[in-house]
Amino acid sequence: MQLLFIHGSGATSRVWRYQSAFFTDALAIDLPGRPGGEFCTTIESATTWLKAYVDENQLEDFVLIGHSLGTAIALQYALTYPTETKAMCLSAEAPDYGSTRTH
């Protein structure tokens, strides 16, 4: 299984540098707009972007690991694509995130 790390709001994939160094097959992604470019404006749009990333990179048997905003994206991904989600590890969940807020 491959680990797929999703950072929180205001962060980048660099927050996962130690995990990425330890788990050499792990992927730590930068969400759109971080560090540059256009932000996803909803959890759903970030989930759609993540699905395209997964498909483009032909990922299978992966574990979603999210922090803060990354937990909301991981949860939405699991709800939207339940057969693709093998497992999740969620840290510092952000219960105040609504479906229209990503930053």
Image: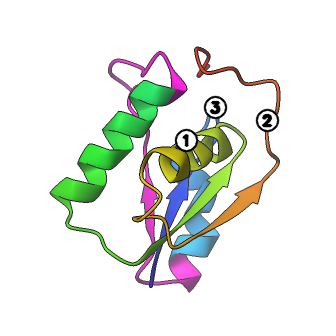
Badge 3 vs badge 2, beta-carbon distance below 8 Å: yes
Is residue 10 placed above or below 68 in the rendered structure?
A: above
Magenta span covers which residues? 21-43
Amino acid type, label 3: Ser
Residue at left offset 17%, top offset 55%: 56
In which quadrant is the C terminus drawn? top right
Badge 1 vs badge 3, beta-carbon distance below 8 Å: no
Question: Which residue was labeled with disc 3?
Answer: 9
Q: In the depicted view, which residue is nearer to us: 10 or 62?
A: 62
| Label 1 environment density (alpha carbons within 10 Å; few <14, some 14–19, many ≥20) | some
- State which tag comes first along the sequence, 1 or 3: 3
Q: In the depicted view, which residue is nearer to us: 72 or 9?
A: 72
Q: Is residue 34 visible?
A: no
Q: Which secondary structure, mark 2?
A: loop
Q: Which secondary structure, mark 1?
A: helix
Q: Which secondary structure, mark 3?
A: loop
